Amino acid sequence: QVQLVESGGGLVQAGDSLRLSCVASGGALPNNAMGWFRQTPGKEREFVSAHTKMTGRTYFSDLVRGRFSISRDNAADTLYLQMSKLKPEDTGRYYCAAGPPYFRGKITEQDFNNWGQGTQVTVSS
């Protein structure tokens, strides 16, 4: 399977915006649903957002809905996570992941089988 590579993280202030990108090294992005998760030290990895290529449907955690958007540029073969109005609690390592063709219920880590190494996002207050 291809290796997913995230980029775009950094240190920003509360209220700022960032755009994360995910590309596939050694091939194309999987032709399935893809998502973003985040994790902070001592906590479990949590779902942020997902995009189903089959239908174009998008999913968001309640914590980010209305502030984040997810998109997939097929021409650029890139998955994006546009984050705006960032809060300190958005701080974490953000992971891109490839999942199933579609989701049947609540989206969890177990739905995804290919993960990137992550990119760090730090939001200062």
Image (cartoon, grey):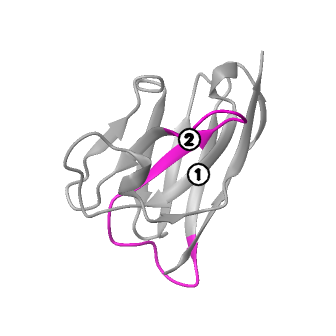
What secondary structure is found at the residue carrying circle 2?
Answer: loop
Q: Amino acid at mark 1?
A: Tyr
Alpha-carbon distance for marks 2 and 1? 9 Å
**44 within the magenta span:** yes
> With respect to residue 29, does 39 lie above or below?
above
In the displayed structure, would residue 79 be above or below residue 44? below
| Residue at image point 41% right, 59% down | 112
**Are the residues at dot 2 and dot 1 in contact (C-beta closer than 8 Å)?**
yes
- Residue 75 visible in the picture: yes
Residue 70 placement: quadrant: top left
Q: On the image, numbered disc 2 is attached to which residue?
A: 45
Q: Which residue is mark 1?
A: 95
Q: Is residue 14 left or right of residue 36?
A: right
Prevalent SS, magenta region: loop
Residue 101, located in which quarter of the rendered image?
Answer: bottom left
On the rendered structure, is 8 left or right of 75?
right
Q: Which residues are magenta?
A: 24-46
* Numbered disc in front, either 2 or 1: 2
Secondary structure at badge 1 equals strand
